[in-house]
Each structure stands twice: as C-alpha cells, then as structure tokens.
Amino acid sequence: MLNEKFNSFLSWHIYQVYPRSFYDSDGDGIGDLAGVTAKLDYLKELGINAIWLCPCFKSPNVDNGYDVADYRDIMDEFGTMADMQKLIDALHSRDMKLILDLVPNHTSDQHKWFQESRKSKDNPYSDYYYWYDTPPNDWQSMFGGSAYSFDEVRGQYYLHSYAPQQPDLNWENPKVVQEIQAVVDFWVDMGADGFRIDVIDQISKDFEGNRNCFGPHLHEYIQALFGRKKTEHIFTVGECWAGELEEIRRHIGQDRGELSTLFQFGHLNYGRADKFTPKPGSLTQLWNCIRYWDETMQNNELLFSVFTDNHDNGWMLERLGSRQYRYESACCIAAMMYLLRGVCFVYQGQEIGMLNPSYSTIEQFRDVESINMYQALCKEMSPERAMEKINFGSRDNQRRPFCWDGTKHAGFTTGTPWIPVHSECKTCNLEKDRASEKSVWQFYRDILHLRMAHPALTVGRFAPVAPRDTNYCAFTRTEGDEQFLVVCNFETPQELKIDGAKGKLILSNYGLIEKTNHYYAPYEVAVFRRTLHG
C-alpha cells in the first residue's frame, strides 16, 4: 500500500508556470513573480493546489534559466527574493504548494564556481567541473556539436551536455554534492514544498558505457539530496528517461529514499517522427501507453505522473487532437488523462486548448535549440521547409506568452513582449474560451473539482475496461462503494456497449443528457458515477 504521504500526493493538481511568459506585472515585457502571485486566485478557481515554477534563479538566460548563475537569488527580470517570499506566503495562505525547478547537472559558465574553477588546476573549485587536456570521447551536445569546449583561461576542455555556456558539474567531487544539498536546504527553509529535478539521470556519468547518464553513483547522489530527514517529507519529481520498471523502482520505490515520482515521456512521441517532423499518430496509441503505465505503477505501489504538455514539446492537442473538433478533442484528452490515478500536471495554456502557432521567419523565435536546428536544416532544405519544421517542433510553441484575452499582446503585458505572442491569440484566449458554450477551461475545471470532491478519483483503484488497440478508452476508478466509469470515444463515431454504463451521467462534453442509446459522437466523453453494493 502507498503510505500516507504518497497517498496525499495523488490529490495534487500541479500547474506548470513558465514565469517569463505567464503574466507581466510591471510592463517590461517579461513575466515575473509578482505576476504569478497576481494570478493565484485564477489558478485556485481552476482547481489547482500546487504550482511548479520553471527556473527563476539568477541566470544570463542562454537557455531560458536552465543555466543558473546563482541558486540562491532571483533572476533580475523576475523580481527579488522578497517577491519570492511574497509568492510563497500567498500560496500557503491559499493552501497551495510551491515546487521549484532544480537544475543540478550543470550551471551557467557565469556561476562563481565555474569562474573560479577555470582559473587554475589547483584552486578550491578546480574539480567542480569535468576538465580534460583532450576530449575523452565523442559525446555530442544536446544542442548540437561537440559536448566539449576549450577554455582559453584554463587551457583545457570542459564537458557541457547542453550549450557551451552550461558546463556540467562534477558530482564525483563530494564538495559538489554538499553544495547542492545546501541549495535544497536553503529553499526548503524558505518554504518550498518540493522540487522538479532537471535531467536527474545525468548527474552521474557512465563513462565506461559511453553514455552521459545513469552512471554508477546516480542513486547514491539522489539519496544524498532527498533521503535525509531534512528533505524526506517534500515532493520530488524527476526528469529522467528511465523506461524499465526496475530502473523506475530504483528511483521512486517507497523504501528507496529518493524521489516521489518520475515523468514518463514515451507518450509524447506519438504524432511525430522526431521532435521537428510530424507523423500520423492516434489516441489509441496514447491509450495503450497510459493504460499500461498507470496499471503497472499502481500494481507496483508506485506513483504515476500524469501530463500531456510541458515547456519542451509542442502541444499534444496539435499532434493527437483535431483542429476541426478542438473543444471536443481537448476535452477527450483531458478526461482520459486527468481522471487516471496519478499526480496531475497541467501546463499553462493547456487548459484553454492551445494549438501550435505559425510564423514565417526565425527572428520570431528565441529558443537556442530551435535557432540551431533551423540553421542546420537550411543546409539541407529550403528556408520555407525549415520553418515548417520549426513551427511544428519548437520549444517556443509552449513558451510564448499566456493568452489572457484578445487585446494587444494577449493581455500578457502593457509593454513589448520578450517574444512575439501566439499567432492565434485573438481566436484562442482565456477570456474568449471562458465565455464560450464550448469552454475547454470549464471542462478542465469540472475535472479538477470532481477529483477534489471524490476520493475515488484520487486514491481510488484504476481498472481498464477497454482493451488495447481500441478506438476508444474506458476505465473505472473505485474507492469503497463509490465507482466512476470514464468513457472517451476517439475520432470515429460509433456505438459502444460498455458494461457498467448504467450509473448517473455527471460529466460530458456533449451535454448532460442521459444516454438512451450507445452512440458516441467524435471525441465524446461520458463520466458515470454509481454506488456499489447498495
């Protein structure tokens, strides 16, 4: 059985905030912490009880904050430490939680540790990073090119798994472990309730296996961070490409003293051949995947993380939904995901059914990955074709300002936004969606509030009703005498005769009209509630 702490996490509805693009409180074109604080009542109304704040620590922003220059200070454009304390206090006064984005694999090259480390081979920070006279292997950076760069000051090469301005920390040095422990403790003392840990699988390198992750000391390092009395009570979720059950168990088993849960990323690949290339995908593929993982995690007493979108991938609705049936398919995906058993993550803008924008020039993008990819693609194809790929797969799809309304700059700022707003913000924005009879926002709110009201939809047992490879999904959630049946038809209208669909219809995206037949329209959702044994 999951212990009490883990059971409590099943009721968390976590909203991922990309602060640079959420809401600008001071008109400088950049979202900030005060802007997040100003919108907490909006999130509370939606049914959110925790936020995951993407990187907000001091940074030169080569990689939008994932290059940290000071773990104990706030990015200048986001505000001050006083603004952070106000946000924490405002969250806690609303019985909401704060999850911070921790980046332990690398720092900015502007961080004091790296600036000191590069000075010589024998200073106190010398071994905080990986240094070599010649590159020891042919590892490539995630952003293209060699993962090793030559530093003129020190006269050696250093390892960077991402941009050259993001040198990898050397966790084999015990002082590095102690430094990151101190960072975690600092924020826990300030009031943080948990952490999302960036590329946690990379903090230990497997040099013998020639891969930049899952090294021999990985679990030792994670336990050093989160297996201590100081941190054992907090919520932690790791960004980690662990696909095998035993490796997942090593990360999040209740007896491990490591993480609360991990993100499973396999379902994000449906609808694309690679990040920048579309490929036909289906909700059937999605159902097969999440059905397997939710059942597997439940049977092994592990916490499943439920999400469809994040700051690194284009909108799932674009890949697996329908522009013609935007409302219906957005609701279908929401129901089949967020009525599962697991910790719920909602990315900003997802709750109004955002789709990918479209732009004609690379100058309308800011993401280093996208810019590098565009330059590489232009060597192989026309600029127009390259832009099609960037429009499909760019991380900026998720990072553009939140569309609050249809006014200039989408109500995000009174100034000039740091990146052009979504190209379709006048037709898809919060104000317009909430006023619509077909409101994606209202459907999300209904789901989240339904979960809050019924333990069967949080701690209740998940049981699939529809088998694999069907053009619909159906499952039950049961706790005590209460049971919910969730039916989500996919794109093809059809008759579905499902055992148990005799309860009271309490949620639908086609209206709360009691079903007198078994016909389901495209992307129709029907949620039934019934009492067992009585």
Image (cartoon, rainbow, N blue to C red):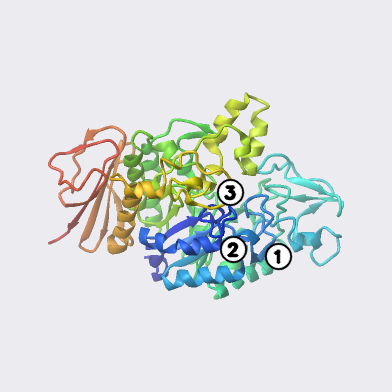
Please state which of the two labelled residues, at mark 1 or mark 2, is closer to the viewer: 1
Q: Secondary structure at mark 1?
A: helix
Q: Is residue 253 visible?
A: no
Disc 2 packing (10 Å; few <14; some 14–19; many ≥20): many
The residue labelled by disc 2 is: 222
Q: Is residue 90 visible?
A: yes
Q: Is residue 53 left or right of residue 502?
A: right
The residue labelled by disc 1 is: 176
Which of disc 2 and disc 1 is earlier in sequence? 1
Disc 1 packing (10 Å; few <14; some 14–19; many ≥20): some
Quarter occupied by residue 67: bottom right
Q: Secondary structure at mark 2?
A: helix
Quarter occupied by residue 172: bottom right
Please state which of the two labelled residues, at mark 3 or mark 1, is closer to the viewer: 3
Q: Residue 163 bears which disc, if any?
A: none
Q: Is residue 374 left or right of residue 336?
A: right
Q: Is residue 323 above or below residue 177?
A: above
Disc 3 to disc 2, C-alpha distance: 41 Å
Q: Are marks 3 and 1 in contact (CB under 8 Å)?
A: no
- Residue at x-position 35% and y-position 33%: 324
Please state which of the two labelled residues, at mark 3 or mark 2, is closer to the viewer: 3
Q: Position of residue 340 (x, y in %)?
A: 34, 53
- Residue at x-position 17% and y-position 59%: 531
Which of 256 and 122 lies nearest the eye of the viewer?
A: 122
Which of 468 and 430 lies nearest the eye of the viewer?
A: 430
Disc 3 to disc 1, C-alpha distance: 40 Å
The residue labelled by disc 3 is: 416
Three-letter code for the amino acid on which mark 2 is drawn: Ile
Which of 436 and 365 lies nearest the eye of the viewer?
A: 436
Q: Position of residue 228 (x, y in %)?
A: 56, 73
